[in-house]
Amino acid sequence: MMRFVLRRLVQLVPTLIGVSVIVFLMMRMVPGDPARQALGPEATGDEVAILHHQWGLDQPLPVQYVYWLGRALHGDFGRSTVSRVTVTQEIWARFPNTLALTFASMAVSVVVGLTLGIVAAVKPNTLIDRASMVVALLGVCTPSFWLGLMLIVLFSVDLGWLPSFGSGGMAHLALPALTLGTAASAIIARVTRSSMLEVLGEDYVRTARAKGITDRSVIINHALKNALIPIITILGLQFGGLLSGAIVVETVFAFPGVGLLLINAINNRDFPIVQGAMLLFTLEFVLANLLVDVVYGRVDPRIVYS
Amino acid sequence: MALAARTSSTASDERFRGEARSLWGDAWRSLRRNPAAIAGAVTLAALVLAAAGAPLLAPFNPAAQDYNHLLEGASRQHLFGTDNLGRDIFSRVIFGARISLSIGFFGTLFGLVVGVLVGLVSGFYGGFVDTVLMRFLDIQLAFPGLLLAIAIVAVLGPGNLNVIIAIGIFSIPIYARLLRGSILAVKQFDFILAARATGANDARLMRVHLLPNAVAPLFVVATLQLGTAILTAASLSFLGLGVRPPSPEWGAMLSDGRGFLQIAPHVAVFPGLAIVVTVLALNLLGDGLRDAIDPKLKKA
């Protein structure tokens, strides 16, 4: 197992390098000269040239990349061009918020999705089943930002129960987590249902029932455990959606996380922050996928990682 | 997809029966019996027609501002109400359909064409080419979901074309993998060997023998991806990165409506509903197509 993890980590390196190249190039591809922008329109050619040299912008691109990567690996991503605070600090200040949001949303999606899926699978083709799947389908088709706005109207404006923006505790996390978790719960519900249906038809379930084991025990201990495998896969795949969905949801709720930071930075052309945030999201995603594979290997005894 | 039991058994009788025995014929029949898919198809057709006939259908000019009717709720004159500049939301939603549908369509088409080419080359030639192309895809897939599209639009700037490009690039891996898988599954079969033996060159093999097998699932995926493309485009516009105001794109309209949730929530309700309906129709149709073409594909 350890060898598998190590091997996968090593395989990640070229991918991560590729990602860093893309992130680096992207910022260089944006039209406009950062030195000229920093100095203002009255800057002379000489002043711009000096700043170019200072910032290493007069070097060939691959050299610039190597310097940038070297600094990045030491945790130095430069400073925000807007706030002059280091990128690391800006991101670090907001990272816990985004993390909390992601986990809360995942919790919501797992709880809601699993419950809905199990209920639908246990009573197939009944009203409950059809209704659950309709709800799940709607969940997939609804844009998260619209859902967020509707929830704000319902819970903040009309009912006044929950705050609609900012952070500061469970109440502020509630609506964003609910919004972000919905789309994922819909997909998890559908996968849970089909996976459970497949498992419930298996012989060993029939045997368990014949032995007199209670329905609830059959469902949870025999069926669910085996049905979990594809569900875990989907969960892993959903994580990417949760990460990028967090960007949108944070914008809707003005939730001070890394996602909102990224969007504001893009609008402000604050490239060091954009680079740092994008690298963070990508790294999180890639590591999460690896984690899913590891968990998958543990959960399914049929899989042998050589 | 049950076929009626046949009482006669001779081949000539079957020919005269007239029922299609092809993949597409069977698929069409199965689709016809699926009410959800039909509903999806009809809705989609209605949307396309509405988008095409927008100038005729919309009661108002989508850009016309009327300061006498600001932020009004739904009324007989303004079916969906008016926004903060007095523009008729119903007309804007109809014109927005044009933008969303065309961006979604062309973005998906772009991704489809490039993805199919990549998958084709990768699966067919294998070896080094395959490894390199798959590595590129891995790098692209390392970016979670929307992030890549956001990055592309951040670099290229706002506007319809850039959103199309972003959606296209973002969806390439899906089609590439599909094609590649399809080819790898079929490459070993004897009929490929036989075709080569009779002198078929690479292009002919691809065109006549390999590609047709992949078309059916491609169709399904493309339909479902169209929904994702429209959602992505709307998300980008909502974030201020895609199609900018005053364009009546649905996502942009939602972004505008954000500021008025307390006093005029209807501004945000209707464009969002339009998105839901469109994506729902595409999903229903796509699911129906998938069930029709290969029930074995049905996973969730």
Image (cartoon, rainbow, N blue to C red):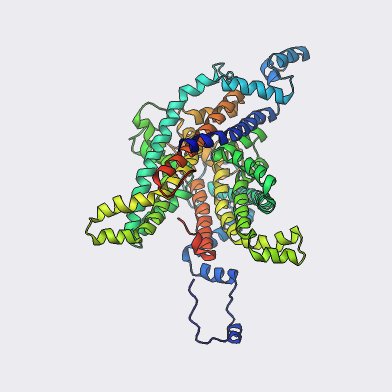
Q: For residue A69, what is the image quadrant?
A: top right
Q: Position of residue A60 (x, y in %)?
A: 74, 23
In the picture, measured across the screen, residue B186 lies left or right of residue A137, that is right
Q: Is residue B137 above or below residue B43?
A: above
Q: Is residue B174 above or below residue A67?
A: below
Is residue B71 something one can see in this rendering? no
Q: Is residue B31 above or below residue A10?
A: below
Residue at image point 51% right, 41% down: B254
Residue at image point 57% right, 49% down: B91
Q: For residue B140, what is the image quadrant?
A: top right
Q: Position of residue A44 (x, y in %)?
A: 76, 13
In the picture, measured across the screen, residue A20 lies left or right of residue A295, that is right
Q: Is residue B268 above or below residue A85?
A: below
In this view of the protein, which residue sits in the foreground, B120 or A207? A207
In this view of the protein, which residue sits in the foreground, A299 or A29? A299
**Tally of numbered discs:** 0
Q: Position of residue A220 (x, y in %)?
A: 30, 50
In the picture, measured across the screen, residue A178 lies left or right of residue B164, that is left
Q: Position of residue B64 (x, y in %)?
A: 61, 43
Residue at image point 35% right, 60% down: A202
Is residue B250 something one can see in this rendering? yes
The quadrant the C terminus of chain B occupies is bottom left
Residue at image point 41% right, 47% down: A300
Q: For residue A16, what is the image quadrant?
A: top right
**Most distant residue in the front direction:** A306
In this view of the protein, which residue sits in the foreground, A145 or B288? B288
